[in-house]
Image (cartoon, helix red, strand yellow):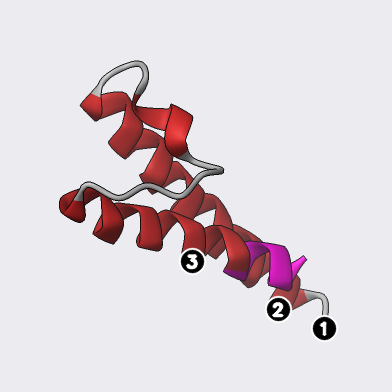
Amino acid sequence: MRSLGVTLIILGLGSMVLNYLGIYFIVLYWIDNWGSNVGWAIRGGLVGLGVLMVLLGRRHD
């Protein structure tokens, strides 16, 4: 569960950085279809969910 969380954090943060450069991950190219604010909310949600998964995964180790 922690490795999936770390992957989501990397995708979310990477997408935030790359968005400023006009570059997108192919997997996350669709998130700006509903507007910039929704795209940022999805990116933040990915990071938040990833952090939650890492923290919950750490509790069960």
Residue 61 — which label? 1
Q: Secondary structure at mark 2?
A: helix
Which residue sits at x=82%, y=83%?
A: 61
Task: Tell me how far mark 3 sits from mark 2, CA to CA.
Answer: 18 Å
Q: Please check the rendered image and state whether residue 15 is part of the magenta-colored stretch, yes or no.
A: no
Residue 16: percent from left, percent from top: 29, 54
Q: Secondary structure at mark 1?
A: loop
Q: Counting residues from the N terminus, which is met first, the one under dot 3 or under dot 2?
A: 3
Closer to the camera: disc 3 or disc 2? Answer: 3
Disc 1 marks which amino acid? Asp
Q: Secondary structure at mark 3?
A: helix
Does the residue at mark 2 contact the one at mark 1 (Cβ under 8 Å)? yes
Which residue sits at x=47%, y=53%?
A: 48
Residue 58 — which label? 2
Disc 3 marks which amino acid? Ile
Q: Is residue 54 above or below residue 45?
A: below
Which residue sits at x=82%, y=75%?
A: 60
Q: Nearer the viewer, residue 9 or 54?
A: 9
The stretch in magenta equals 1-6
- Most distant residue in the bottom direction: 61
Q: Is residue 14 left or right of residue 58?
A: left
How many marks overall? 3
Q: Quadrant of residue 45?
A: top left
Task: Tell me how far mark 3 sits from mark 1, CA to CA.
Answer: 22 Å
Q: Check disc 3 and report the residue beneath it.
A: 10
